[in-house]
Amino acid sequence: MNVMPAQIIHVSIARTWEDVFAFTGKPENMPLWASGLASGLMRDGEDWLGDGGPIGRIRVRFSPPNPYGILDHTVTMEDDTVVVNSMRVVPNGDGAEIMFTLLQRPDQDNAAFETDAAHVLHDLTMLKSLMERDE
């Protein structure tokens, strides 16, 4: 059994978890806070297509709508590598906690993994800023 190293990156947001979940659950909002998708996503059937910057064109499939705060999504890269991303929004008092589980891929060294973790934290911090500004 192969278990990859993991980091759970999380940010507290002073906005209801329902508001955060509703906003982050819309793929068309991702370019506002997910810097790797700054060029936007276009719907393609059940998937969304985008330009992942240095990783090239990507295909994203999101978990179906649900009432549980689950925002999981898979990203398929140009070389057919599939990355499964687990993301959750949960209540935290009157606000929300957003959590992203980052797994270190077998082909990824520790420096690249730490760079990815910093990138995810940056994006979640941007989401926090957007959500708290619009309150």
Image (tube, grey):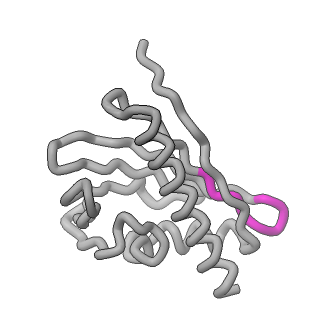
Q: Is 28 or 34 nearer to us in this picture?
A: 34
Is the residue 108 above or below the residue 125 in the image?
above
Magenta segment, prevailing SS (helix, strand or loop): strand
Q: Residue at x 59, y 57 (%)?
A: 69
User: Could one spot residue 59 in this view of the protein?
Assistant: no
Q: Is residue 67 left or right of residue 133?
A: left
Quarter the N terminus occupies: top left
> In this picture, which residue range is highlighted in magenta?
92-99
Q: Is 17 or 115 nearer to us in this picture?
A: 115
Q: Is 62 or 7 nearer to us in this picture?
A: 7
Q: Residue 76, image x and y in percent?
A: 25, 48
Using the rendered view, name the quadrant where residue 18 is placed. Answer: bottom right
Q: Residue at x 58, y 66 (%)?
A: 21
Residue 132 in magenta? no
Residue 95 in magenta? yes
Using the rendered view, name the quadrant where residue 83 is placed. Answer: top left
Q: Residue 67, image x and y in percent?
A: 58, 59
Quarter the C terminus occupies: bottom right
Q: Residue 49, image x and y in percent?
A: 23, 64
Is the residue 3 above or below the residue 21 in the image?
above
Q: Residue at x 67, y 85 (%)?
A: 133
Q: Residue at x 31, y 50 (%)?
A: 75
Q: Residue 80, image x and y in percent?
A: 17, 42
Is the residue 22 above or below the residue 111 in the image?
below
